[in-house]
Image (cartoon, rainbow, N blue to C red):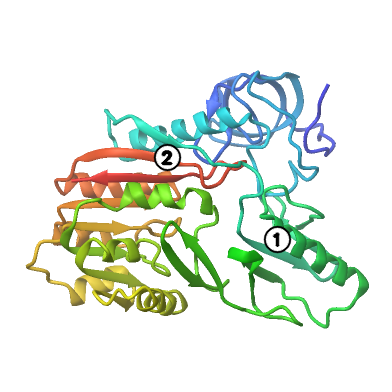
Amino acid sequence: MKHIGAQPAKSEKKSLLVEIERILPGGVGLAHAEGLTLFVPLAAPGDRLQVRVDRVRGKVGFATIREIVSPSPMRVDPPCPYFGRCGGCDFQQLSYQAQLDSKVEIIRDCLHRIAHLETLPEIQVYPAEDPWQYRSRAVWQFDSTHGRLGYFEAGSHRVCDVGACPVLAPELEQLLKEVREQIRRGSLETVPAEIGVVAGDLASISVAPAFDDLVTAEVSRKIGTENYTYNAEAFFQINHSLLSSLIGAAVPSVAGRLAFDLYCGVGLFTLPLARRFERVVGIESNSVAARFARRNLKRAGLLNATITTDRVARSLQTEWNVEETIDILLLDPPRSGAEAGAMDEIVRLHPKQISYVSCDPATLARDLETLIAGGYTLDSIAMFDMFPQTHHVETLVVLS
């Protein structure tokens, strides 16, 4: 018998025998028992489980695995000793193919249920080159009271003390060990409560905020033929092995006159767009990222792109009444999706093609509903597994 999350069951909480039907958006398993729809974290489709119902809201129950009675063929042994406590990974119990299949189903579920799309194009899948040691960006939490360094435990703000992390890039894994050792020796004068780290090429590392001899340096990363400079204060994708494929799928191969790049960050898509289009407009609200985008364009000799530091909705509303046809509008918003008003402004500008890169299928589906109501057709969907061992997924949809 296997047990997960070794907390003793409370007598007043109901225990049920269930079978997991599938994985839902959010990464939880779905089961039904005694008139309840149950959400069960860390499950695999086909598992037969003894679960404890921790709380009930209407006819929905939130449950915890107490015993794996009969494991699914899709279930594997998680290699990380912190699995089940650390909130960083919630798919390590699934074989890699099962992870990919579950993420495709999550995308379909959101597009059907939220965007109300009955028929979908086939979802093209881009697996990670390596589902381990891929994460080139992380945020570590430090609990000064107990001397713990790691990630928040699932569903809490308690810090899980992590001695090793199997999804971290090797250079960040080494840095984690070094910082932990310095904390143990008491050789650091101060340690921030939250530490952001990113790794670039040639084992370069940036840390924010700077503390002791760890500094917010700049790192560089070559993706395809483009070079990007950034630091830990500016967003850059965490899984670099898939970025060439993502850029190739999101950026049209044909040339054109005008392209927009919304939430452009440090210019990941702006640079390749500027090589194909006569004029490119990038909009980014983070001033640090916008500054790097301008520098990356200048170093590449691309003078046909401009970067506006502003919120996307406000910039589109106040600055752009474009009579000239926009050939392509590309957007890559944060997990929360486009901010209020942005999608209405995009419909108003009426670009010929839209490439929407999303790290949350639910907010993507919400925004797609506005675009489709505005006259757009969903042409293609691609899934890029940027976040192996987690339920998170990068999705690209192209509309015309």
- Residue sitting at x 45%, y 50%: 359
Q: Residues within 10 Å of mark 1 (few under 14, many from 20)?
A: some
Q: Residues within 10 Å of mark 2 (few under 14, many from 20)?
A: many
- Residue sitting at x 61%, y 78%: 217
Q: Position of residue 222 (x, y in %)?
A: 49, 62
- On the rendered structure, is 149 left or right of 371? right
Work out whether residue 237 can be spotted.
yes
Q: Which residue is mark 2?
A: 383
- Disc 1 marks a residue whose amino acid type is Glu
- The tag earlier along the polypeptide, 1 or 2, is 1
Element under label 1? helix
Element under label 2? strand
Q: Position of residue 24 (x, y in %)?
A: 51, 33
Q: Nearer the viewer, residue 94 or 327?
A: 327
Q: Position of residue 223 (x, y in %)?
A: 46, 58
Q: Position of residue 292 (x, y in %)?
A: 44, 76
Work out whether residue 200 can be spotted.
no
Based on the displayed image, in which of its 4 quarters is residue 81 positioned? top right
Q: CA distance from mark 1 to mark 2?
A: 27 Å
**Image vertical order of residue 17 relative to residue 299, above or below:** above
Based on the displayed image, in which of its 4 quarters is residue 397 positioned? top left
**Marking on residue 171:** 1
**Image vertical order of residue 274 relative to residue 112, above or below:** below
- Disc 2 marks a residue whose amino acid type is Met
Q: Quadrant of the N terminus?
A: top right
Between disc 1 and disc 2, the foreground one is: 1
Q: Nearer the viewer, residue 169 or 16?
A: 169
Q: Which residue sits furthest right?
A: 185
Q: How many marks?
A: 2
Q: Which residue sits furthest left?
A: 323
